[in-house]
Amino acid sequence: MAHDAPSTHMKPAIELRDVACTFISKDDPGQRYTAVEQVNLTVGAGEFVSVVGPTGCGKSTLLNVAAGLLAPSQGTAHVFGEPLHDVNTRAGYMFQTESLMPWRTALQNVMAGLEFRDTPEPEARAQAEDWLRRVGLGGFGDRYPHQLSGGMRKRTSLAQTLVLDPDIILMDEPFSALDIQTRQLMENEVLALWSGEGRRATPSPKHSASEGHQRKAILFITHDLDEAIAMSDRVVIMSAGPAARVIGEFTIDMARPRDVAEVKKTPRFLELHAAIWAVLREEVLKGYQQQLQKVA
Amino acid sequence: MWNLIKPRAATLRLWQIGILVLIFVFWHAMTKPGLLPNFMFDNDRQAAFFFGEPLKIFERIWVWFVTDADIYIHLYVTLAETLMAFGIGAASGLGAGLWLALSPMASAILEPYIKALNSMPRIILAPIFAVWFGLGMASKVALGVTLVFFIVFFNVYQGVKEVSPVVLANARMLGANKKQLLRYVYLPSATSWVFSSLHTSVGLAFVGAVVGEYLGSSRGVGYLILQAEGQFDINTVMAGILVLTCFALVLDGAVSKIEKRLMKWQPKAGETEKL
C-alpha cells in the first residue's frame, strides 16, 4: 500500500463478525429470504475497501448493517471496537438513490447535519459554503435539488456527508446513476478528498500520528469491478445471493495517488482485474441464472 | 379580428371574463319579464320568480355593500367562522395525522373509529352541535372543523407514510434525533400533501359555516339567505350565493399564494431560467 498503513494499535473502523441477515415477508411470515450469511468483513481505520458482487447479492444489506440502519439477524457489528446498537454516529452514508431533502436548498442540505448537532447557524453556514466550494458547487448553494443535475446532486450529497467530518464513509454505488465522464470525475474527487488533498486547510506533517486518524475509512459498494480496483486498497468479493458470503479478497497494491482513468491502463491493473474476474465471473453468471429463473 | 382575440396566454383573462358576461347576458335575456316571448312558462314573470334577475341581484348586492351597508356584520361572522374552522381543523388534522402516522400501534387501534367517523355524513351533526354549542358562532365552527379535519388528517397521514425512506435514512445518518426528524423531515414532507388538501378544505370550511347558519342562527350570510328564502325573494338568495362564491374564491386564492411561497422547492414542469 502506498499510503501509511493504519497503525496496529488502532481498532478497525468497521468489523462485521459472522453477520447474517434474514428478511421475513410482512404479508407472509413463512416467506424468508436470507440475503447474507456468515460474513466477516473488516475495514481498517483509514482504509478504502470495496465490496463487489453480482446484483442482488446483499451488498447494500451489509452496508446498512455497518450504518446501524439494519440490525443483523445474527452476528455483531463493531465500530472502532464498540458494539454497534443504534445508528452509526461515526459514519457518513452516501446513498445510491436521491437522498437530499427536496425542500431544502443545496446549502441547507449540506448544513442539515450541522444543524442536527446544534452548531451555531453562522458557523454551520460558513462550513457548508466551504464544502460546497470544495466539491465545485460554489455558486449553487441556493438551488433546490430539482434544479441541479444528477452529478451536482451527488456532489451535494458528498459535501453533506463530508462536512460532518466522519471517520467512516459508507458508499452504496454512489455514482452508478452518473454518466461515465462525470463518474470518473467524481471518483477522482473522492480519492483526492479521501487522501487529504481536500483538507489542505489543516496542514499536518506527513507520517504523524494524526495523519492515519484523519484519513477516513471508506466502505465502498459497487458492482463495477473497474471502479473497485481503481479506487480501493482492498477488494472484497461476494457470492451470488441468496445467502451470499465473502468468497475472496484481493489487496490492490498500486501506487497512490491514482487517476482512475490512467490507472486502468497499467499492466498491474489488468493483472488484478483478470485475477478478480476469474473469481467473480462464475458468481455473476450464477446470479444472472437465478434472476432468469425468478422471471420464468 | 379573430387573430387578435384568439385564445392564448395573453387573452386568457379576456376569455374568462367574456364567458362570465355571456352567462349573465343569457340569464338576463331569459328572465327579464317581457324581453323575450314566453315559451317555457304561462306567465312572463314566472322565469324571474324561479331564477332571479341579474340586474336586481346586482342591485341587491349594491344595497348590501353601499347603500345600506348592512351586510358587513353578516360577512364578518361567516368569514370568521370559516377561518376559525379552517385553522382549527387544519391544525388538529396535521397534529393527529403526524401522531397516528408515526405511532403504528395507535393508528392500528383507532383505525375502525377513524373510518367510521370519516364515512359518517357529518353535515347531519349540525343540529346536534347547535344543541351543544348554542346558536352562536361556536356550533358553526364545530361543524366546519369536523369537515376540514378529516381531509387534512388523511392527507397528512398519507404524506408521512410516503416520506422517501432514503431521505429518512439519510437524515438519521446525519444525526437527526426523533424530534429533529419530525421537524426537518416529516413535517416539510407532509406539507405538500397538506396544501393539496387545503384547497378542498377551505371550501368545506365555508360549507360548514353557511350550512350551520342556514340551520339556525341570527347572523351570517347563511342567515340572510334563509331569511330571503322564507319570503321567496330569489334575487336576494342568488345575491347571497354570489357573494359567498366570490369570497370562497378569494380564500382559495390566498391559499394558492401561501402555497406558492412555501412550496417553491417543488419542481414545476418545464421550468427554465431566462438568462
Image (cartoon, coloured by chain):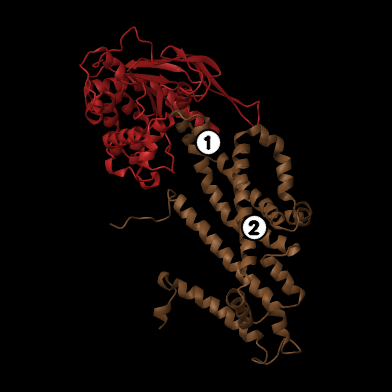
The chain containing the residue under callout 2 comes to: B
Choose top left, top right, bottom left or bottom right for residue A203. top left
Contact flag, marks 2 and 1 (Cβ < 8 Å): no
Q: Is residue A288 left or right of residue B97?
A: left
Please state which of residues B238 and B138 is positioned toward the viewer in this rendering.
Answer: B138
Taking depth in this image into account, of A209 and A175 the one nearest to the observer is: A209
In the depicted view, which residue is nearer to us: A175 or B93? Answer: B93
Mark identifier at residue B81 = 2
SS category of the residue bearing label 2: helix
Three-letter residue code for mark 1: Leu
Residue A177, horizontal then vertical, whole percent: 38, 38
The answer to whether A86 is drawn above or below residue A114 in the figure is: above
> Which label number is shown at residue A295?
none
Residue B14 locus on image (x, y percent): 46, 75
Which image quadrant for residue B59?
bottom right
Locate the C terminus of chain A by quadrant: top right
Chain in red in the render: A
Give the side of residue B196 with respect to residue A273, left or right. Answer: right
| Amino acid at dot 2 | Glu
State the quadrant of the N terminus of chain A: top left
